[in-house]
Amino acid sequence: MTSLAMINAAAQRLDGHARVTPLLSSPFLDDIAQRRILIKPECLQHTGSFKFRGAWSALSALDPSARAKGVIAYSSGNHAQGIAHAATLHGVPSVIVMPADAPQLKIENTRALGAEVILYDRANEDRDAIGQAIATERDLTLIKPFDEPQVIAGQGTVGLEIATQAADLGVTTGEVLVNCGGGGLTSGIALALEAQAPQMQVRPCEPKGFDDVTRSLISGQIERNDQTSGSICDAILTPSPGQITFPIVKRLCGAGLVVSEDEALHAMALAFLRLKIVLEPGGAVSLAAALFHGHALTSEVAIVVATGGNVDPEVFQQALQRFS
Amino acid sequence: MTSLAMINAAAQRLDGHARVTPLLSSPFLDDIAQRRILIKPECLQHTGSFKFRGAWSALSALDPSARAKGVIAYSSGNHAQGIAHAATLHGVPSVIVMPADAPQLKIENTRALGAEVILYDRANEDRDAIGQAIATERDLTLIKPFDEPQVIAGQGTVGLEIATQAADLGVTTGEVLVNCGGGGLTSGIALALEAQAPQMQVRPCEPKGFDDVTRSLISGQIERNDQTSGSICDAILTPSPGQITFPIVKRLCGAGLVVSEDEALHAMALAFLRLKIVLEPGGAVSLAAALFHGHALTSEVAIVVATGGNVDPEVFQQALQRFS
């Protein structure tokens, strides 16, 4: 079970390897949101998403002899790139099981970062089963994308940085909007803030039609999505919150926020225009929630974790054509 | 005359007001450049370019009674936005004289940031004369875009950050590639590095057809461009290096680097893809030099100052369509 001590230890292992991303802001975005917005651009992290943190945390925590044999992961793309890059930097092999319909850019990058990529059919095959089988067959360590304590600890370092950086700006209270797939980042940040900024509350953000976490928080038990593909927000399309992450999310987070695909694209265009950062749709859901669902927020300050930027150029151009 | 002491004093005045931008990198860019590249993304600075630093430095150094009357500036857009925002934050009025053919986005932003904007014809009118006339008439303090010691001191804070951040990565030697218009940023960084990282050398970067600094460095005296419009690199189209900046550039900088417009667009597309940042053409010239003119560099490490990101969406889409 991930603790503050594990998050602090992960932060030490990440020091000098992961980037400390800044907090950005724009008076233009504050005007739209009608409140102060601070944006944590994890798209600027190595491999273009926060996932490098959890990947490095997990890799660096492995027993060296196990690590040397190699690791395996399954991922729609951002965890894939994080693991591939962290494994290559550690000098060990990696195998990544990716859905065949993942963005081409993410598949190519994962290969280029040094991984062996195995594609599967997201609609008809079970990635967990495939991952487990290959792990056993090749004696690789499976690093799960979110339901893994050291991964959660690594993602939690985002929360440590938010607490420090926001306090530097005089902000100690507010809602922290986090794009939520399986809940690794959401639960990690929530644990870090519980200790370091207890007046901040995490609000999980999801795309319409894939609001399993929002519904789980309402019912109090793990709910599933009917589908796991068919949204441009590919980075956060997991079937359900995790067995490890959900109890943390349930204990610490406020209600979920759900945005449309068009709102995510609009937020991408505004991030281009006002922040000069590149977000992917699944990385812009939290910004969309802050900008277009302010009625559902209660704080004067919203801190937005902009989780990733690995978007195909065509999708990005679509956002600019329609919303800039 | 700007000194290290003035740059350090500017850094103190900027503390908590300007952003400390991180140093970014990508193994994909290192592969293209065939050397290590570190990128300082000043597009993430307030108002989308490094110009906010010089603007804040100059505004904050003014005598309070003079400052209260207001300031005036002339600028193709980035200095304009920097001054407008810094003046509004200081609670004083600003007037900005801008070329009528500046990117629409920059004109609109400057107004939205609180300035009164006066447009002029870049080809047929003299912005210096217009600026001086209005300054006298309304008793405003003119803040020149580059030939102004406190502006140079503010831009020099980029150099202080580079010295510290590169040293943290173990880098103390290398060429620092800086987009160069009038030379305010180039001279400020060169002065800071002379003191803080003397084994680094600044290389000014310019677009083809507007290589006044490169030619001035060759001839040893101030040379002028034949034209001051007609390039997408609008941010750095000044007629010639400044009277104050050129002697500093001449004393401290290596030879200039000149890139084509297509190379700047290509660098924009690669910054989108690999760094997840938005650059304008004039802000991407230095990255283009590192990526496509490596034969003209001599160091193992190139530090690229990516100076701004205020680009119209149409131009950005053109870069993606052609080069991604």
Image (cartoon, coloured by chain):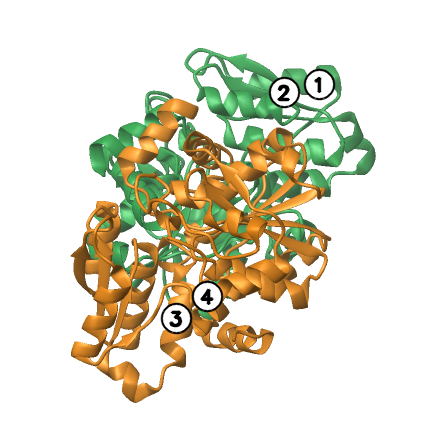
Chain colours: A orange, B green
Question: Contact, CB < 8 Å: mark 4 with mark 1?
Answer: no
The lab-note entry on whether marks 3 and 4 share a chain reads yes
- Name the mark nearer the viewer: 4 or 1: 4
The lab-note entry on whether marks 3 and 1 share a chain reads no
Local secondary structure at mark 2: helix
Residue B61 seen in render: yes
Quick check: A30 left or right of B187? right
Label 3 or label 4, whichever comes before in sequence order: 3
Coordinates of residue B1 in the picture (x, y in percent): 60, 47
Frontmost residue, A170 versus B183: A170
Disc 1 target residue: B136
Quick check: B128 left or right of B317? right
- Which chain does the residue under circle 3 lie in? A
Residue B132, numbered label: 2
Determine crowd level at label 3: few under 14, some 14-19, many 20+ residues with C-alpha closer than 10 A.
Answer: many
In 3D space, how far apart are the residues under numbered discs 1 and 2 (Cα atoms)? Answer: 6 Å
Against B67, is B128 above or below?
above
Coordinates of residue A215 in the picture (x, y in percent): 52, 47
- Name the mark nearer the viewer: 2 or 4: 4
Disc 4 target residue: A243
In 3D space, how far apart are the residues under numbered discs 2 and 4 (Cα atoms)? Answer: 68 Å
Q: Quadrant of residue A89?
A: bottom left
Local secondary structure at mark 4: loop
State the residue at coordinates (56%, 32%).
A292
Q: Residue furthest bottom?
A: A65
**In the image, what residue type sits under mark 1?**
Thr
Q: Quadrant of residue A8?
A: bottom right
- Name the mark nearer the viewer: 3 or 1: 3
Question: Contact, CB < 8 Å: mark 3 with mark 1?
Answer: no
Disc 3 target residue: A56
